[in-house]
Amino acid sequence: MTTVLHTGIGELVTNDPAQGDGSRLGVLTDAALVVEDGSVVWVGERRAAPAADERRDLGGSAVVPGFVDSHAHLVFAGDRAEEFAARMSGQPYAAGGIATTVAATRQAGDATLAHGLARLAREMRRGGITTFECKSGYGLSVEHEARSLAVAAKLTPETTFLGAHVVPPEYRGRREEYVELVTGPMLAACAPLARWVDVFCDRGAFDVDEARTVLEAGMAAGLVPRLHAGQLEPGPGIRLAVELGAASVDHCTYTTDADVEALAAGTTVATLLPGVEFSTRSPWPDARRLLDAGVTVALATDCNPGTSYTSSMAFCIALAVRDMGFTPAEALWSATAGGAAALRRTDVGRLTPGHRADFAVLDAPSYLHLAYRPGVPLVSEVVTGTQHAS
């Protein structure tokens, strides 16, 4: 098998505290790494690099692990630009806007949905995201939820069944019937196409009892739970996620002392989505409180047409540092290793032997520039396994 030596790395973030400066990021300077068959087989100082079949000099650039986006809604049609403009004029966000995207998605053909997903996946890749999760949730019928997952599964193994996004208009006033549909025929059609099951547990969506019913049904069908909770107001959803051993609970804009204590004592990752707060002018989550309590925190884009239409993890890192109390190092870790933890992946999010060779080359001397130069497209090259893209 061919080995490739990537050398001339001014700063290499490994996310391995045993490397380099001994920090959580495991930063090496004047570094190199060797890739074989899509995996990292060696990292260290450039002067100690072993021989390899091929050699690539990165000219002093910084290299970071590929971003892991653990929360995205990428299968949809249409957009909600007018809704965004209304919010910027003072209209508050409400969960009901999802119905607009549901109507457009149901009317769109499979080719339209696949084209839109591929476009967003390319954007993510150009911005350094090498692993992404993708939810259904804009079909809200057996047919349309299943086809959304079928489209998503062609581009990522991290597919999430989100039939319990909101109650669709045709079931208004018949919530129990819709929950029965989600946990019955819809789950049966979607479980073979998904790894995860998710619920939007918040005001205007599903209450905690409904969320429990859906998640437990999904778990019985072999899916692993995750949960939207605490976006619009405090509630019991975060603690439900911890109780059920969910991989992650996402948003966490509103957290109580009991929520933070539960997260700190459990294994559930708190995934924060700064693009949502930016796009809805909502309060910022108290990330410092979570981090100081020892909670594992991830950052994700929540790319969707209504509340966070961004595919840029670098933008989310900058927001997290500027407005949510993260240090630059904490934000980068949360966007890489934290995202991997939220997806229960042990093969991505780090650059150490045995991990996938997924990384981003920055047109900058340090990872600090991701927050220091917000809005600048600093990712000059992305490597995923053995594939390179500029």
Image (cartoon, grey):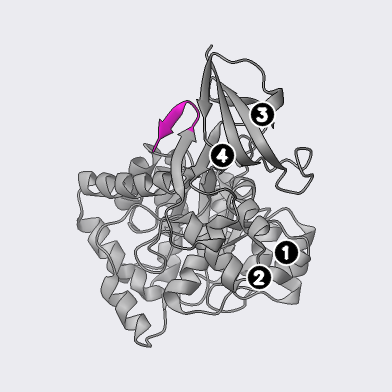
Residue located at (40% from left, 51% from top): 186
What is the crowding at mark 3: few (fewer than 14 residues within 10 Å), some, or many (at least 20)? some
Residue located at (37% from left, 63% from top): 309
Question: Label 1, label 3: how many angstroms apart (C-alpha)?
Answer: 34 Å
What is the crowding at mark 1: few (fewer than 14 residues within 10 Å), some, or many (at least 20)? some
**First along the sequence among labels 2 and 1:** 1
Point out the frontmost of discs 2 and 1. Answer: 2
**First along the sequence among labels 2 and 3:** 3
Residue underneath mark 3: 46
**First along the sequence among labels 4 and 3:** 3
Question: Label 4, label 2: how many angstroms apart (C-alpha)?
Answer: 30 Å
41 vs 1: above or below: below
Residue underneath mark 2: 325
| Range shown magenta | 384-390
Marks 2 & 1, CB-CB < 8 Å contact:
yes
Q: Amino acid at mark 2?
A: Gly
111 or 59, which is in the foreground?
A: 59
Question: Label 4, label 3: how many angstroms apart (C-alpha)?
Answer: 11 Å
Q: Quadrant of residue 141?
A: bottom left
What is the crowding at mark 2: few (fewer than 14 residues within 10 Å), some, or many (at least 20)? some
Residue underneath mark 4: 60
Q: Amino acid at mark 1?
A: Leu
Point out the frontmost of discs 1 and 3. Answer: 3
60 or 159, which is in the foreground?
A: 60
Residue located at (63% from left, 15% from top): 51
**First along the sequence among labels 4 and 2:** 4
Q: Position of residue 322 (x, y in %)?
A: 58, 70
